[in-house]
Image: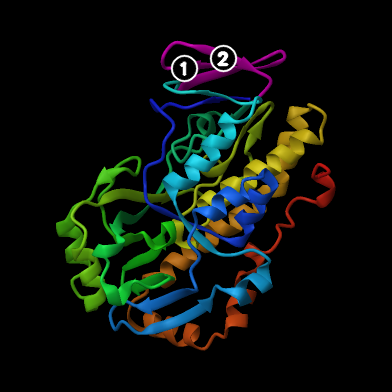
Amino acid sequence: MRVLEQASEFGEVGAGIQLGPNVHRMFERLGIDAAVNAISAYPDVLMMRDSITGEVVTEMPAGDRFRERFSYPYAVIYRADLHRVLYDACRASDLIELHTREKVVGFEETADGVSVRTEAGATYSGNALIGADGLWSTIRRHVVGDGDARVSGHVAYRAVLPHDDMPEDLRWNAMCIWAGEKTHLVQYPLRRGELFNLVAVFHSDKFTEGWDDYGDPAELNLRFADKCEPVRTLLGKIENWRMWVLCDREPVKNWCRGRIAVLGDAAHPMLQYLAQGANMAMEDAVCLADMLVNTDGDYEKAFVRYRDARYLRTARVQLTARLYGEAYHASGVVRELRNMTLAARTPDDAYNAMAWLYEIPSSWRDADRPAP
């Protein structure tokens, strides 16, 4: 396999990422679970607080009881750390070539495969082409052809705070969402508490293609001006924020064409409200690998089977993420109803509500997986 990366080096920008039990199964399949577990943090609880009153709305225990239900933990990890684990695993494999400064600008199907052209003028040929090139995918434009991504009207500011800078009374071993009117703030520990991840989301008409831009503290503080003191204190601890615009797309089924397929955000970009974007991409990769192994080199057959196994599950995540965003940002009577409804949930209610997502994916059959 040859990997073409448009950046000058393999690296990851950003801050934290949440890892549900479903993606831990994928790490286990790939043989990287021990490396991921060694650098992850494990929250005791997943919590929602009302960002205006500061009151706890609902809690989902994420310790032993959670693991007993789902067989795997809920973890949070620094994006750069997860990227390093994946990168090191690729470097250790004799089956993978890594190339940087190679932005794919075009491709064509040939009699026995696919040929791609890069911005640098290079040409690469292979048996098939898999586009994992994100929200603004070049490959998707040719395979799906559905135009630009849908801009949600929400932006996210993210930052990392050193442990000692985090207010002592807020150093919780928790993944906490401070839900507010047209805003929310997420906090959780990274690197086993050495750092804390902060992500502030609010409604805005600003738009920048991509997601690694500098944020405007003045706009951020304006949007959160009416929130409770702990939220304002956390936001005041950060001087430099990275901003990205939240976009997704309508779910589609046509992820492949001949010997060309897309996966991850190139196939099913989703809003971050379920914290499943990277998790779904990892599921895609394992599923696609299974299909390739079990079709004896028939790429077109493997791609169709991969698509059929994945598109309904990922569509459900895309649409549910939108609904979660509405709940996080509810105002007025809807906010009161949200708080009342969620406050009545028991831990088992919360687990049952997430079982479709966290339990072993049934969207591709055991028979389609290679023997251990």
Q: Locate the N terminus and report the quarter of the image it occupies.
A: top right
Residue bounds of the magenta highlight: 103-128
- Front-most of residues 285 and 29: 29
Residue 109 part of the magenta-drawn span: yes
The three-letter code of the residue at mark 2 reads: Tyr
Q: Label 1: few (<14), some or many (≥20) within 10 Å? A: some
Precedes in sequence: disc 2 or disc 1: 1
Q: Locate the C terminus and report the quarter of the image it occupies.
A: top right
Residue 6 part of the magenta-drawn span: no
Q: Position of residue 127 (x, y in %)?
A: 69, 20
Q: Identify the residue shown where x is 14% and y is 58%.
A: 218
Dividing the picture into quadrants, the one containing residue 61 is bottom right
Q: Position of residue 359 (x, y in %)?
A: 68, 64
- According to the picture, the residue beneath numbered tag 2 turns out to be 124
Dividing the picture into quadrants, the one containing residue 54 is bottom left
Q: Is residue 313 visible?
A: yes
- 246 lies left or right of 321: left
**Label 2 secondary element:** strand
Q: Which label sits on residue 118? A: 1
